[in-house]
Amino acid sequence: MSNTENIRKLLPFWSHLSKEEIERIEISLIEKSFSKGELVSQNSNSCEGMIIVEKGDIRVSIISEEGKQITLFHVSDNEVCVMSASCVIAKLTFETVINAQKDTKIFVIPSATLDFLIDNNIHVKAKTYELLVERFSTVVRVMEQILFKRIDHRIADFLLSHYKKTKNKEIKMTQEEIAFEINTAREVVARILKQFAFENLVELKRGKIILKDIDKLKALFKD
């Protein structure tokens, strides 16, 4: 299967592209593969462009002046990341660090090509801005949780979100990995999970957590 056929399935505005615009994408499109843990992009001094994840998972985060890394969101199979092109889309600089969470294959529409598409195609512009707004909404939600949500609510929310996405009550993650995802200390996660286990909400095993009472976790999150 050609790159064009792959991209046609993944880009939400493909059906609105002209022949010239499709050719520009085909000529400039970059295909990349990354191993788990590898740096995909650190755009403090660059504007990568639009990233399309064909297969895998990338984590988008920011780093504070003190060196603390804050996870903003993940982009997985068949999803598009526009934060790496925010300098083109919104004419602003949004410094992010993007890492592969597992072996990942992506396509990149370079910023120059994306800039041309946005300037010349209202459908591309509208859909790209829509994607950007969705991601910024996620970023705002993350910041609200860090600033205002109780840590037990944040952990319950994370467990429920993972369950909703995977449909699996068994979450194969360490306490350290969960702490990294919700931007807190491992010791804090360990303490809260022990409390959840005491209340029979979860069962703790080495390297994984088993959800035992989804309804009570939901009730806790809504308190």
Image (cartoon, grey):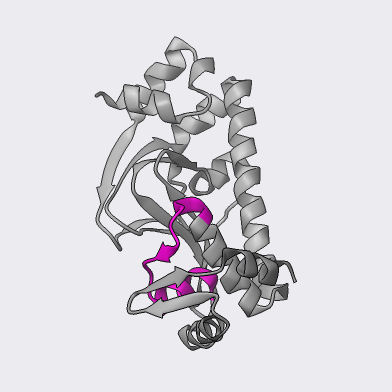
Is residue 134 visible from the viewing direction of this image?
Answer: yes
Side of 221 relative to 68 (left or right): right
Q: Position of residue 111 (x, y in %)?
A: 46, 38
Is residue 42 visible from the viewing direction of this image?
Answer: no
Side of 76 relative to 17 (left or right): left
Query: In which quadrant will I find the N terminus?
Result: top left
Q: Where is residue 123 in the image (x, y as percent from the top left)?
A: 61, 22
23 to 80, vertically: above or below: above
59 to 212, vertically: above or below: above
Q: Where is residue 187 in the image (x, y as percent from the top left)?
A: 48, 88
Q: Position of residue 105 (x, y in %)?
A: 30, 44
Which residue is at the front of the view, 184 or 170?
A: 170
In the rendered image, residue 22 lying in the magenta stretch gets the answer: no
Which residue is at the front of the view, 165 or 43?
A: 165
Query: Which residues, given as a range, are shown in magenta?
Result: 164-183
Which residue is at the front of the view, 200 or 186?
A: 200
Q: Which residue is drawn at 36% across and 78% down?
A: 205
Q: Residue at x 63, y 69 (%)?
A: 216
Q: Which residue is drawn at 64% across and 37% down?
A: 130
Q: How many labels does the image show?
A: 0
6 to 208, vertically: above or below: above
Looking at the image, which residue sits at the far top? 19
Q: Which residue is drawn at 41% across and 37% down?
A: 110
Which residue is at the front of the view, 178 or 81?
A: 178
In the rendered image, residue 173 lying in the magenta stretch gets the answer: yes
Query: In which quadrant will I find the C terminus?
Result: bottom right
